[in-house]
Image: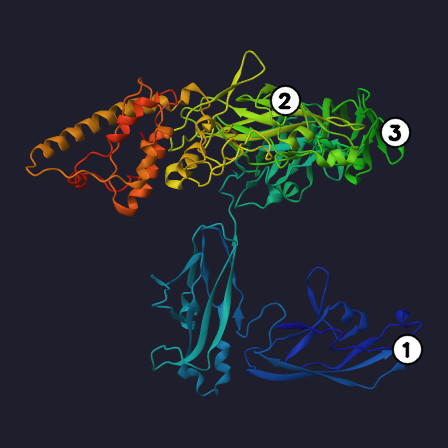
Amino acid sequence: SRKPISQHDLKAVTSDVTNAGNRTITFMIVVPPKLGRLIRTNSDNTTQEILSFTQSMVNEGVIMYEHSDAESADWSAEDSFTFTVSSPPSALDPQMFPIVISYEIPRHDRNSCLLANTGIIVQEGGRILINKTHLDASNLLIKLPEVQRSMYEVWYQVVSLPQHGTIIVGERNVTKEKPNFSQYILNKFGIVYLHDNSESLIDNFTFAVWLNLKTKSATKPHGEVLEEMFNISVIPVNDQPPELKTKRLHLKVLQGDVSVLGSENLKVEDLDNNPAELKYSIVRNPNNGYLAMKSNLSVSIQDFTQADIDNGGVWFVQDGSSSSGVFYFSVTDGKHRPLYKLFSLEVVPIALVLVNLTDVVLPQGQTSVSITNAHLSAVTNGKSTKIIYEITQPLKYGHLMIENEQVTKFEQADLNSGRLSYHLSNFTAFKEVLMFMILTAESNLTEQVLNITMKPLVQVVSDMQISNQAVHKLRSNDLDASELANLTNSDPRFEVIVPPAHGRIVKKRFVNDSVFEDIQTFTQTDIDGGVVLLNIDTNMTGIDLLNDSFTFVLRADDVQPAVGHFEYSIVPYSPPLVQNFTAEVPFITSTTTLKIPATSNDRVLVSSHDEVPTVAPKKTVPGMWLGQKRWGNQLEEGPSLNLAMGTRASAGTGTTDQVNAMSFREQAGESSNPWHIIIPLVLVSVLLIIAVISVCVLLMCQKKEKAKPLVKNQTDIVLSSPAHCLERSLTVPTVTVTPLLKGAEGNTSSALMAVRHEQLLPTTLPPTVEQPLQNSWLNLDPEMIQYCRKTNPTLKRSQYWV
């Protein structure tokens, strides 16, 4: 083998540092090496033996030692040569250069300890013979004494098989089960490597080599084994045409801009060729621009390679037109037929987009407000990022200002920094319209509108629910402009500009008045006084919830007006379980009448809290007789007049006061009049009671003993007293109710029966008719009571006492 002698191995210098570059240091061979020779490599790769050389030759790496007696050498040996070095006028005494020779020292041209391990070069899909010139490990025998060398032979075992080919020894393939072959086979027959015709360019296999006694079978030992790799280079064969990998040949480019044509837009692969060998040609140029190299975008190109595309060197320059285009190209590897394709170029127009256009809200009582990018913001995809806003019509009620300067133009940067503001100068309008257009160097956006609205300084209740067919009194916690009143020292005025769709706004003329009129204007004082009411009356058949509202303009002294909304939800009316009557109070208006029924509450809701009812109740009727309140406390939602029968009231007994204190629930319309349900129920109840009485009489006739009279309860005197007799209308069927309880329970029962009885009779009955009706309650056989109910049944929905 050969090995260069570098300046790290041999170097001489002079003491003349300033002229060191002009001095020549010469080495003269006095005693040449015995096991090899010194050679010089020429520029044409030829070599020649030398006896002298210079330091500059050593520095260039052209001086080598060549070991020439390989056959007679042992596994390791030593050699040397003697030389002198001079640089006139100076010279050195003879020096010795030692050389160590060993198979274990790696060669400069390959990494192997064997006599030969050169590897091979094979054509794609071909085969090649491997012999001792490619692989020879016979130098391992040198490790043995010369007398034992003939007793051993060299064996190989393939530890790792090649991935892209097969090793053939004789007539068999080398496999994991049979991986061995000997140096004798290599020397005499050789082995064959067969490539699998894949597109791989390299392959290899790893082998182990050892010395094995000829008298023993070839078995790999645990020690004294040398492992190396045998490299295989594959020469590709151009047998595959280029393949287009990009599914969609498409490129987006901004109008008038440039864009890179990358490998994600156009990619062709060829396993037999590298990207630089795949050449593109433009068959038909684009109709909306041209292709150019990145290094010179002003010059159109007609040819480029896949490597240019992969490196980002190909760009498309758009000519500024708005139309999209295409170009026609071909690609080839130089051997196969070209591949022709059409590439589309989509032009994205320059756009100016208004991404935020939100009304500016100016609180009532204030004169200025900032306009920021939260109200007005635009973006563009063009090169010019400067966005300008220009007012197209003068403002009517104010002006725009940046800091202390009035402006009609401003930029997006002014909005982003919050420097732009609107100043109100005219307090007569509740809305300002800002007409403007947006401009950039490349596009514009015209006829844009920004609304500047006034926000009323009022507190409005949220999530409010009002029962249908009810009259709701507006309170200060529903609609409160007290803050505006304190700010302006005036009484804020509400002007209804859009009335409610399912009701009316009415007002009492006076606090204690029961006459109402439709209104369009009211003040905060009216709300605080409780004289403004909301009358709800609509058909909610099949509807569980109905949204409604009214719109108003809130005005006050020395401030701008503002538009507000009062929103609420209407829920269906739930009739009470106790039967009520309707009292009608006419309005001043000749076309409408507001029905204000009484409820079973103990205060008058349409009047002020200072009003006193005709008869003050002493006791509240138990909840089981008052009915369920489906929508919660509706004291304010069901305003009523106290229509207790004061003309028949008497302070003599508590029972009468209790009956007179009962008020009547509102009946809001004929569509939900309870009489339409009660009258059929009364008729059915009369028939059922007659049937029960008939059965009872039949049972009485079968009794042989004399019936005992029922003792009157002390509390029943109230019913038989002429002073408290109720009048019964002859147009209503008579209903007889039998008291069932005895003793202490009878007192409560009689009182309750009295209340129910009076509720079911109109006030127009003559007193003389009531006496027989009351006596019929008290003349039944006591044994009849056991066939009757002793408890009050639970009323279900839409059931009423009759």
For residue 796, say whether it is visible.
no
Badge 1 crowding class, 10 Å Cα cut-off, few under 14, some 14 to 19, many 20 or more, is few
Earlier-in-chain disc, 1 versus 2: 1
Give the residue number, with chain letter if any, for mark 1: 88
Task: Identify whether 341 is placed above or below 589.
Answer: below
Mark nearer the viewer, 2 or 3: 2
Give the residue at x 53% y 46%. Answer: 272
Give the residue number, with chain letter if any, for mark 3: 406
The picture places residue 136, in percent across and down from the top left corner, at: 49, 71
Q: Are marks 2 and 3 in contact (CB under 8 Å)?
A: no
Give the residue at x 75% y 33%. Answer: 485
- Report the quarter where the C terminus lies: top left
The picture places residue 499, in percent across and down from the top left corner, at: 60, 21
Q: Secondary structure at mark 3?
A: strand
**Of the residues shown, which amino acid type is indicated by label 3?**
Gln
Give the residue number, with chain letter if any, for mark 2: 509
Q: Which mark is residue 514?
A: none
The picture places residue 186, in percent across and down from the top left corner, at: 43, 68
**Of the residues shown, which amino acid type is indicated by label 1?**
Pro
The CA distance from mark 2 to mark 3 is 51 Å
Mark nearer the viewer, 1 or 2: 2
The CA distance from mark 3 to mark 1 is 94 Å
Q: Are marks 1 and 2 in contact (CB under 8 Å)?
A: no
Left/right of residue 165 with respect to residue 334 in the rendered view: left
Q: Secondary structure at mark 2?
A: loop
| Residue situated in front as seen by the camera: 719 or 668 | 719
